[in-house]
Image (cartoon, helix red, strand yellow):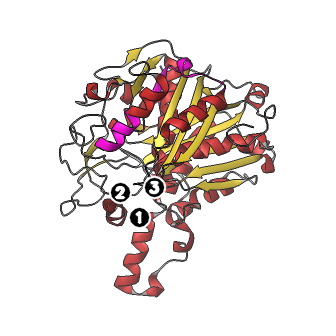
Amino acid sequence: MSALGIPEGRRRPSVVTGLGVIAPTGIGARRHWEAVLAGKSGLGRITRFDPTTYPVKVAGEVPGFEAAKQIPDILVSRTDRFTHFALAAAETALADAQADPATLPEYEMAVVTASSSGGTEFGQQEMEQLYQRGPAWVGAFQSIAWFYAATTGQVSIRHGMRGPCGVICAEQAGGLDALGQSRRLLDTGSRLVLSGGTDASLCPYGLTAQLPTGGLSTEDDPTRAYLPFDEAARGYVPGEGGAIMVVETEDGARERGMGHYGRILGYAAGFDPAPGSGRPPALAPVIRRALADAGLTADAVDVVFADAAGLPDADRAEATAINEVFGAGRVPVTAPKTLTGRLYAGGAALDVATALLSLAADVIPHTAGPVEAGHLGIDLVVERPRPTPLRTAVVLARGHGGFTSALVLGAGDRTDHLT
């Protein structure tokens, strides 16, 4: 049996044929990739509201996103910003994959996305109406716009995708889990899956809900606010955005005459034991199971895209797991999310998009910023991108409370976003 419970022999190779990126580094895969290679940060002082009275003042905001120019007005008013991001990214991904939903059987197209915070900004707006003006001013769409599955529902309705649809709520690991689920859907009859994740919780209500985790950086200098694996790490920067991808079988893509950015070779997920149990974290076993699902050994991996929590204990645990599985300093490690902040459910999905572009370009993007990781024994790529032949990448993600996931990617044959 595979890591997803599918009997061996039934696995149909899954490939990513379309990318839709909405990120603090830019809108669109090409713009994002150019910013990553240039080390151009999307972090800065929060502008979506006045953060003066909040302990956290730095975040990764998506620049220049105008929902009314991306999606119909009626959807703008009825849905939250995290859904706006996903609708725009899904449209881009389908166009990039040259996939026209109108030409495909409606019950063979599926949607599975990840969400961590749901529609917090829409919810805040309606709560303000409730407490300032009364219940008659609360809109009917509050009942669905805040919901974690709102994005999946709106994307499936917009594109007539009536196959299996769902949402994964696994905090910051959810983007990988959604892509893992897309493989299961392809194995059980779906032809094309829109998958990935977006989040948008940069509003007073959303930020306040994040503060109790104790994981957010209170550093006001954007260049020093998020330093994963560094001895000076004191937390992470929140962000918004994410990525939606078109995932289909390799045979299906070939029949359509489409190349692909890469293969989803392996996936596994687990959950950290309760604190004080004396049991080790789940990450190392999860990586091993993902590699086993891919039919690969550790020495076949060319780069690891780290979760990079930016918290000393969590960073140390991740470095320990990487060294345990791959050998101390034997695999290059990178964390390009230092340019965007952690995008919650959108972060891991964006890392997958970045990893696919990295494989296509044969270059490992660097971990931007004044980061030093020598004390942890990992080969963290810093200062500048590292050109090197790449065939296989592992993407790691962990979420608050213990969610842990790993995805193994293989190189594809599309390079059109690189020039």
Residue 374, placed above or below residue 102: above
Q: Residue at x 26, y 28 (%)?
A: 375
Q: State left or right for residue 384 relative to residue 404.
A: left
The image shows residue 367 at horizontal and vertical percentages of 33, 29
Numbered label attached to residue 274: 3
The image shows residue 80 at horizontal and vertical percentages of 48, 61
Labels 1 & 3 near each other (Cβ < 8 A): no
Q: Residue at x 35, y 59 (%)?
A: 210
Residue 354, placed above or below residue 344: above
Give me the C-alpha separation between circle 1 and circle 2: 8 Å
Find disc 2 in the rendering and name its residue.
202
Is residue 374 among what the camera can see?
yes
Find disc 1 in the rendering and name its residue.
121
Of marks 2 and 3, the one in the foreground: 3
Nearer to us in this view, 233 or 368: 233
Q: Secondary structure at mark 1?
A: helix
Give me the C-alpha separation between circle 2 and circle 3: 30 Å
What is the total number of numbered labels drawn onto the structure image? 3
Is residue 70 among what the camera can see?
no
Asked whether 59 falls inside the magenta stretch, the response is: no
The image shows residue 332 at horizontal and vertical percentages of 41, 21
Q: Earlier in the sequence, mark 1 or mark 2?
A: 1
Q: Secondary structure at mark 3?
A: loop
Residue 26, placed above or below residue 149: above
Name which residue type carries label 2.
Leu
Labels 1 & 2 near each other (Cβ < 8 A): yes
Of marks 1 and 3, the one in the foreground: 3
